Image: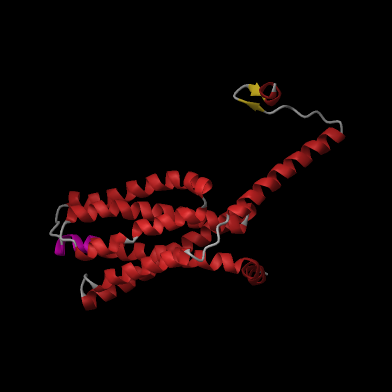
Amino acid sequence: RVWRAGGEFLAANGRRFLPLVLGLVAMGAVLGLERSLLPLMASSVWGQDSYKAKTMFIVSFGLAKALMNVVSGQLADRFGRKLTLVIGFVFGLPVPLVILFTNSWDLVVAVNVLFGMSQGLIGSSLIFMVIDLFGVERKGLAVGICEALIYSTVSVMSAVASEIADKHGYRPVPFIIGAVVGGLGLLSSAFVIDTMDLVRAQQANTAGNAAASDALLLESGAKVEPVTYGGVDNGDAAA
């Protein structure tokens, strides 16, 4: 039954869903590459043995991503999910290139802010679109699939990146791969179909159901209590 439902979903939504999967995988791959190698490179490449200096690498990413997670929903609602996604991938493009060439740890910390912003925008917009596709009744499943795809890719890419670093060193090969993966993520976003049409349809359906429910109550003679907003009912507000 589960496989049949999954097949039916892909048959109906595959053209919209598969580019989102590619975006989630690209996001997880770049995240796994950076998270696994940069802490090891801090000492050997940039000479940072201070725990405080290494902690700033984590703090800069976390604060930037947290800020973008807060505002990404408003951006996606106002300007569309796809545009938010594209901006996120564009923000992330310089990151592996800077790490590839820089000899400054301070610049690594600075570009990590850009990486956090990128990850916040990409992750949020992709999750929004998968939820839009799955519908309000399967939001939990949609979020679970997104998180599973991202962090399974993080795990695989971390293992692959460490193997590549053992054979070829920290630079340049791993971060050339990171730049290519980021570029492929941006390319995949070109095939993404924005889901704002689904959002508007769901909003219209919700409003229609509410209106139908009120009409049934009125026909049955039931009393419909006014909805209050901050102590003022909707009847007073309309007046």
Q: Is residue 221 visible?
A: yes
Between 176 and 49, which is closer to the camera in this rendering? 176
> Could you tell me what secondary structure mostly forms the magenta stretch?
helix
Q: How many marks?
A: 0
Question: Image check: 183 left or right of 11?
Answer: left
Q: Residue at x 34, y 70 (%)?
A: 180
Between 227 and 77, which is closer to the camera in this rendering? 77
Q: Quadrant of residue 222?
A: top right
User: Where does the image place residue 70, in percent across and percent down from the top left?
Assistant: 43, 44
User: Where does the image place residue 122, in percent across and percent down from the top left?
Assistant: 43, 56
Q: Residue at x 23, y 53 (%)?
A: 109
* Quarter of the image that includes the N terminus: bottom right
Asked whether residue 44 is drawn in magenta, I would say yes
Q: Residue at x 68, y 21 (%)?
A: 236
User: Where does the image place residue 179, in percent across and percent down from the top left?
Assistant: 32, 67
User: Where does the image place residue 88, in percent across and percent down from the top left?
Assistant: 40, 55
* Quarter of the image that includes the C terminus: top right
Q: Residue at x 62, y 21 (%)?
A: 231
In the image, farthest residue toward the bottom: 167
**Relative to residue 147, is residue 158 depicted above or below?**
below
**Relative to residue 143, is residue 176 depicted above or below?**
below
Question: Image check: 139 left or right of 45?
Answer: right
Question: Image check: 233 left or right of 54?
Answer: right
In the image, farthest residue toward the right: 220
Asked whether residue 132 is drawn in magenta, I would say no
Q: Which residues are magenta?
A: 39-45
Look at the image and name its color scheme: secondary structure
Q: Is residue 155 visible?
A: no
